[in-house]
């Protein structure tokens, strides 16, 4: 878990729930190994105003301002935190020409959460999180003359409406939207031949062929198309002569944008002391764009729809049986269905034995399905 990426201060965490094992039947695809649910403190738990600061090595500083209170039927809490760490002075993974540390970072967090009583049986909860991060990165290749530091911003907005329809039945409606933007830039100096369009075309067909040519090897054994492009690339390099190995510098970058909108309706019903169930439906839209990592910077969108349900039955007091399933239709991937059955036996208050039979799924993301790594360079010097 990368705690530096959390949108809330660690001190605002109320508890951390860990569910071991495959649970795609409850949480959908990618819930294959375990589920970690981080629950923040309720808005009513906030002090009117507090200021905390701490520091340590290596160059660590954390300063937090938080406050909250009751405003009629609404409880609210907010926090602003600045966290910095200067990290280690050197890294064995970083080339000797790198002058700056390899693991500095600075985070600025803003979090707001509210809870409003709309009546005796209704509550409306809202939240908003924003994080800005600057991270010093390790030089990834010898040609880089500036560190590929990354800058990212993310925000999340959401609401949850809870209605108790009866003593045995409750309904929850939720909606959220999140966005993530990241940029990483650096300057590299490499032989001019890396800018040849013929080499770029060859790399798109057979990366190993392009790597062989950069190492001064004439590749063989590939497809007819790869062999033809290799000959064209070698001819272009020879046409450049000594200029092919001349040091040429340019600015490169990786920019990524991602977003998600999600909505869900969930119904919970307690049939009696021995049986309860929850079921619901949901829809999600995701998008991603990147000039570097996706095909020609094209924005990719995907929509998914889900139906899920879980029931818990207690045949005898120390035994609980859970049965559930999750079905999802994704416009970019094949449909998935994840069933699950679990038996828990608790002979004493402090011990539990369980047996689970489940089918977990993992859905490839848009960067895996439509990846095409390609750098667009600027400020080429000398001009090529």
Image (cartoon, grey):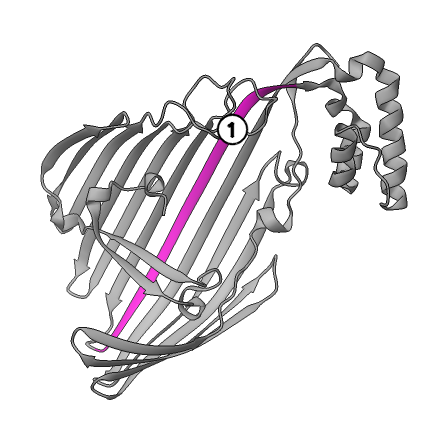
Residue in the foreground of this view, choosing between 192 and 328 = 192
Quarter holding residue 99? top left
Residue plotted at (89% across, 32% down): 231
* Residue 2 in picture, x, y percent from top left: 36, 43
Task: Please determine whether, in this image, residue 343 is positioned above or below residue 162.
Answer: below
Residue at the spot 74% in from the left edge and 18% down from the top edge: 192
Give residue 265's quadrant in the image: bottom left
* Residue farthest to the top, as pictured: 382
Left or right: 341 with respect to 332? left
Residues rendered magenta in the picture: 168-189
Most common secondary structure along the magenta stretch: strand
* Residue 190 screen position, x and y as percent: 67, 20
Q: Which residue is identified by label 1?
A: 184
Horizontal side of 8 relative to 228 (left or right) equals left
Q: Residue at x 34, y 57 (%)?
A: 36
Q: Which of 188 and 79 is in front in this view?
A: 188
| Residue 60 horizontal/vertical position (percent) | 26, 28
Residue closer to the observer: 309 or 251? 251
């Amino acid at each position: 878990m990368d705690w530096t990426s959390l949108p809330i201060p660690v001190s605002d965490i109320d508890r951390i729930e860990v569910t071991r094992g495959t649970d795609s039947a409850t949480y959908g695809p990618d819930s294959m190994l375990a589920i970690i649910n981080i629950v923040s403190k309720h808005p009513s738990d906030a002090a009117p105003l507090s200021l905390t600061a701490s520091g340590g090595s290596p160059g660590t500083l954390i300063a937090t301002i938080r406050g909250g209170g009751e405003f009629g039927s609404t409880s609210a809490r907010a926090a602003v935190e600045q966290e910095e760490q200067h990290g280690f002075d050197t890294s064995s993974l970083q080339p000797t020409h790198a002058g700056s540390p390899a693991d500095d970072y600075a985070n600025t967090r803003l979090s707001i959460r509210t809870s409003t009583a709309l009546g005796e049986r209704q509550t409306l909860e809202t939240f908003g999180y924003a994080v800005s991060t600057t991270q010093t990165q390790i030089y990834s290749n010898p040609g880089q003359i500036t560190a590929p530091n990354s800058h990212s911003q993310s925000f999340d907005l959401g609401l949850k409406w809870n209605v108790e329809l009866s003593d045995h039945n409750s309904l929850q409606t939720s909606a959220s939207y999140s966005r993530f933007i990241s940029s990483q830039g650096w300057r590299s100096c490499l032989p001019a031949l890396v800018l040849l369009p013929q080499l770029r075309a060859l790399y798109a067909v057979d990366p190993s062929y392009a790597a062989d040519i950069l190492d001064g090897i004439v590749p063989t054994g590939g497809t007819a198309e790869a062999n033809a492009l290799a000959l064209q690339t070698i001819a272009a390099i020879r046409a450049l002569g000594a200029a092919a190995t001349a040091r040429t510098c340019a600015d490169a970058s990786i920019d990524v944008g991602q977003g998600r909108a999600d909505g869900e309706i969930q119904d919970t019903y307690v049939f009696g002391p021995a049986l309860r169930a929850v079921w619901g439906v949901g829809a999600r839209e995701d998008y991603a764009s990147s000039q570097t990592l996706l095909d020609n910077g094209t924005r990719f969108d995907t929509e998914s729809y889900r139906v899920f349900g879980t029931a818990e039955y207690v045949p005898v007091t120390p035994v609980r049986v859970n049965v559930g399933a999750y079905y999802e239709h994704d416009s970019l991937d094949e449909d998935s269905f994840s069933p699950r059955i679990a038996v828990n036996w608790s002979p004493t208050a402090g011990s539990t034995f369980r047996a689970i039979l489940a089918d977990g799924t993992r859905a490839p993301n848009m960067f895996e399905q439509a990846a095409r790594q390609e750098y667009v360079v600027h400020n080429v010097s000398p001009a090529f």
